[in-house]
Amino acid sequence: MSADIQSMRDSLNAMLGEIEIFESEWQKATRPAVLLAPCSADSVPLADLPGLKHLRGLIKIDLKLLEKFLLAKGSKGNPSINASYLISIWEEVLHNGLNVCHLFKTVRASKDPEESSVFVQQAKLHPKLSQTVKIDIVSHNGRRWHRINAVKNSKIIAEFKELDSYLTDDESEENIREAPTSELDSSILVMARALTRAARDNPVTILDENYPVIPTITLHLTRLDPAAIQDPRMDQILEKLHDMGIETVLGPRPLAIHGSLSPPRILPTAQLNLDLSCLGALVSDITHAPLPETAEECERRFTTNLDTSPVVRRLIERGRKSAEDASIHAQQLTAQLLPEIDHELIKTLHEMLVDQAGYSVTDIQFWTTAEALQRMLHTVDDIGSDTEKERAKAIANGDIGGFWASSRHPRQYVPLLPIHIFPFSTIETLPDLPSTGPLCFRSLYHSAASFWSTPDSNRGRVTPHTVHSMMFGASKNITTITANHQSIRAFSRGLIPASEEGIASIWSIGPRNLTSGAGELREE
């Protein structure tokens, strides 16, 4: 007996280690569909798997009880713990892998006024509490519910005997009054009926469905061996479960992870939407000017240029910038240029689109909104350097030669020009929700649209112009490239996991400021 207890303790300890690994891999693999460029700040928060912390706490409680039991001399019998149930939960989690989205979820369900089974209490569904139904594991974006039932053969046999006593002892008025409404019933069927009511009362809204989806149910009978019961009613119960649309799993799960825990590979679309921050990065001298050979040279370049820049002097005279601001801006430019030395933006675009995604140059197209283009032109005209103004003007005119004239990169190394303008894309016009295409874009559209109707005071640093660009990219089912990490953090909360489709709805790049400007190119 002591050996069995020690083995159970070892299993629970092993589970704690497995949970740590699973949690880390699950967070990486279920992160939203945001593509991160090298040296881009990881502004996508990692989500916690709901209920996993509770599972870890229950395991620790059982471990303490086991340790106490093993240390107590002369202990007999078994300690009162839930280890077998917790182990079954964990086996089911591993079996479903990345599809798991919630543990220990409780839902409300309508009472069945005709539920008069004598096994209601055995099924842990007391009439006063029957409106609450527990789901051990939720998977597949809420479309599947899993319930662990550790009922043993002896319990089912006892229930059959109880049924027989009700059906034969018809002289007792009390028994007649409490007799079940059907000749065949059990605590398993009572639980199944409650689960099906709960599923009907709690449909799931899925982005790719035009109507709510009723979750399907898996009932895992971990310690039941129907063949050993030798009663035809056991097979009839399993048939009833099947007729109710419930999948039944008998015995323990094989110890194998069916859902891959490898971080998914996500790629952008061949057509791409450029928001204001990305347009600014593409005209910045940081992206195009010859690179310094050392960090010292990098810092000297910006300190000297800003001290002598007529743009900065004009801004100081207007009271929009101080000498201290200019010094801070020089530090920002240095911090942005250093990673550009190792991971050039134009080369990153080429490597991802051509080398990794495999798109031909003729397939790649860049788009933007009329609103983003006008704001970029206005900002560059106000605080851009001469070469930055030339590139901005070239974008507006579709002048390929003018755009690459002062660039260190080969002409059209990435086919940036011409940049196409979405029709009717002024700030006053909102695009329609895409009715077809990958789900990641519909989830981005919904996430961005929720900010559109949010008052400015509750929107944080997410501006209407940012929301506008994201909605247009999503409406066209194309990836939006942005350097605005505040918006990424805000929108990513509503995005589906990248593992769903492998398509990036957002592509995050590092910021590249206008080198003669007063700060990061940002919607204000």
Image (cartoon, rainbow, N blue to C red):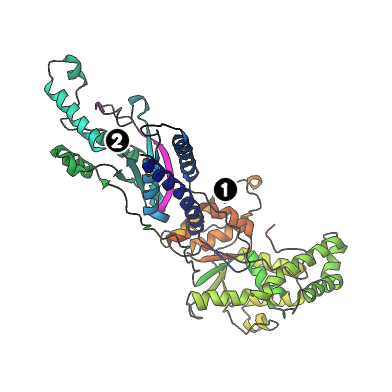
Q: Identity of the amino acid at label 1? A: Ser
Is 56 rendered above or below residue 333? above
Q: Nearer the viewer, mark 1 or mark 2?
A: 2
The picture places residue 9, in percent across and down from the top left corner, at 43, 43
The picture places residue 41, in percent across and down from the top left corner, at 63, 62
Crowding around mark 1 (Cα neighbors within 10 Å: few <14, some 14 to 19, many 20+) is few
Instruction: Report the number of discs.
Output: 2
Q: Is residue 6 left or right of residue 445?
A: left
Crowding around mark 2 (Cα neighbors within 10 Å: few <14, some 14 to 19, many 20+) is many
Give me the residue at 46% from left, 35% from top: 65
Q: Identity of the amino acid at label 2? A: Met
Earlier residue among tags 1 and 2: 2
Q: Secondary structure at mark 1?
A: loop
Q: Nearer the viewer, residue 490 or 159?
A: 159
Which quarter of the picture shows residue 410?
bottom right
Q: Residue 364: in sight, yes or no?
A: no
Q: Nearer the viewer, residue 97 or 439?
A: 97
Identify the mark at residue 191; answer none if there is no mark: 2
Give me the residue at 47% from left, 50% from top: 19
Residue farthest to the front? 74
Q: Is residue 315 left or right of residue 133?
A: right
Look at mark 1 in the image and give the residue it sits on.
453
The picture places residue 213, in percent across and down from the top left corner, at 35, 47
**Which stretch appears magenta?**
98-120
Instruction: Let me know if residue 99 is in the magenta part.
Output: yes
